[in-house]
Amino acid sequence: MDFKTRQTEAVSGWFSKGDSKIKVKAIQEEDMIEIEKEYVTVKHEFAHNPVTNRLERVEWTEEDPVQKTLALGARLILEWENVEINGEPAECTDENKRKLLGESPEFREFYTEAINGITEQVRKEFGSVERSKNSKGTRRKK
């Protein structure tokens, strides 16, 4: 039994609108990490600090929030049925997901409803979408 796959399946679900169906998964930490790696760039330069009279390294991040949002949406949509682009059946590819999310307000609304639905489902099943204080991400006293 592949427990990793079962865990992912436990936080995903199918949602319908008309005769179209999409399967979405709940946002997981690794999704956000991968999107950050791909769409957030850390830049730096050296600037003179007049107080210390020295050059200091200054860092900032640059990101494209639209592309970041489209990439996250494409990552959260796992499958679909009866979805069309320009009247033709569309394969569930990363390119088609981004195209529909970016260009179709009706599909974007359907996707948002599905994400809200899966978030509520996770909240009911696990009690919260927030990590607990006792989760692995919390430091332990030695």
Image (spheres, rainbow, N blue to C red):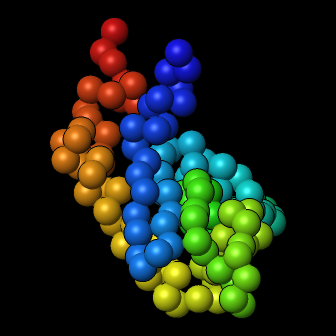
x then y, percent, for residue 124:
19, 47
Front-most of residues 102 and 69: 102
Answer above or below: position of 107 versus 71: below
What residue sits 50% from the left and 57% below the top? Answer: 23
Residue 96 found in image quarter? bottom right
x then y, percent, for residue 50:
68, 72
Query: Horizontal placement of 55 versus 85: left or right?
Result: right
Instruction: Work out which residue is located at the far top of the displayed protein and give it.
Output: 142
The answer, for residue 126, to whether it is visible in the render is yes
x then y, percent, for residue 129:
30, 48
x then y, percent, for residue 62:
70, 71
Answer above or below: position of 48 versus 38: below
Residue 135 found in image quarter? top left
Front-most of residues 5 and 42: 5
* Circle count: 0
Front-most of residues 13 and 32: 13
Query: Horizontal placement of 45 versus 136: left or right?
Result: right
What residue sits 34% from the left and 9% below the top? Answer: 142
The answer, for residue 112, to whether it is visible in the render is no
What residue sits 35% from the left and 56% below the top? Answer: 118
Front-most of residues 135 and 93: 93
Answer above or below: position of 82 versus 24: below
What residue sits 63% from the left and 64% below the top? Answer: 74
